[in-house]
Amino acid sequence: MRRLPPVLLEDGCPRELISLIRTILAACKEISFRVGQGALSGVLGSTLDENIQGETQKKLDVLTNQLLKDILLESGYVKAIASEEEDYTVAGNPNAEYIVAFDPLDGSSNTDINSLVGTIFSVMKAPEGSDPADQSIFMQPGKSQVAAGYVLYGPSTVLALTTGKGTRFFTLDKTHGSFLLTQDFAQVPEETNEYAINASNQRHWQPAMQNYINDLMAGETGPRARNFNMRWIAAMVGDVHRVLCRGGIFTYPTDTKDPNKPNKLRLLYEANPMAMLIEQAGGIASTGTERIMDIQPDAIHQRVAVILGSKNEVETCLGYHK
Ligand code: F6P
């Protein structure tokens, strides 16, 4: 089986970018080990703190953030990092070419129940001559990402990666510590009978999403004239992985539950990298009104509505938003 570095070299991926991706993956291997140790490693449960998003931090959020931050900044390959768990961006090597945004442990509450979690990352180029301490270097739309991916810590540890030449899956061979290519050019099926949404928020959604989901739930006797199945892992990384593997539509729409937080998912380190992986696999990623990767960010922790997955189903959903 082919290992990750030769696959990327054959694609013509710059050596510096390959080294950066390998650095991220070195941290992910360590995270895979720690997560796999579960209660044995004494890192389950919460800290007494909240992160910048006002969410309770898990001990593993703190540990995984520190691991990624240290390894990336020490590597010399990054000009700056932005993390879901950091209030501000952190400056790195002023001469480096790349910047990295990451969610160190997406879906971290799932660690309490030994369910899926993952690390999501997005790599962009820093503007030439930019100051590593200037947060505005991250204010680039998702279409300028040069690489995006996630590492899913499940029964096996799987990397989904794109450098703009398709989406591939690599599986961590834990005996040798290498990521081996297990699927070249993943394709999201255009049609699907499966949707993913936290339906407990239904009464807070806008009318377009209410109508769309009602029509799916009406099944074969409703306007869609067929039955749909629902799945919800409560970790975007797990839900998006399922969509990449067998199709589906995943959405976390705008809602009115908390007027200060109309959207839940973060643009820089959740929506953008997932949108790139999905588009590179033939799917669509939108907010309901615009392509996610066209959004010009105005803050590092900005949140957006997300509707992504199988082309035909996402287009149908977007039809309700017109
Ligand atoms: O980052 C937020 C997140 O954990 C996503 O990974 C996931 O899709 C979502 O929140 C789950 O939300 P809820 O708690 O509403 O199920």
Image: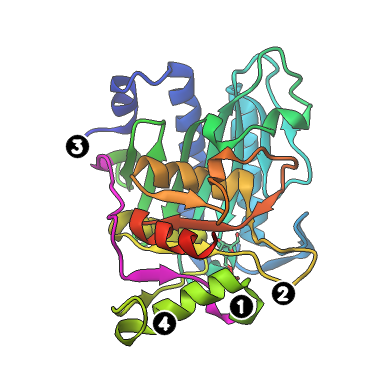
CB atoms at circles 2 and 4 under 8 Å apart?
A: no
Lower position in the chain sequence, tag 4 or tag 3: 3
Query: Foreground: 134 or 206?
Result: 206
Q: CA distance from mark 4 to mark 3?
A: 43 Å
Helix, strand or loop status at disc 1: helix
Q: Is mark 1 within 8 Å of ligand 1?
A: yes
Which circle marks residue 1 in the picture?
Answer: 3
Magenta stretch prevailing secondary structure:
loop
Helix, strand or loop status at disc 3: loop
* Residue 128 visible in rendering: yes
Instruction: Say what amino acid the circle numbered 3 marks.
Output: Met
Q: Is residue 10 left or right of residue 222?
A: left
Residue 189 x/y as whole percent: 27, 55
In the image, residue 226 lies in the stretch drawn in magenta: no
In this figure, which residue is indicated by the disc labeled 4? Answer: 217
In this figure, which residue is indicated by the disc labeled 2? Answer: 257
Which residue: 28% across, 46% down?
A: 186
Looking at the rendering, the stretch of residues picked out in magenta corresponds to 181-200
Residue 34 x/y as whole percent: 51, 55
Q: In which quadrant will I find the N terminus?
A: top left
Q: CA distance from mark 2 to mark 1?
A: 8 Å
Q: Is mark 3 within 8 Å of ligand 1?
A: no
Q: CA distance from mark 1 to mark 3?
A: 44 Å
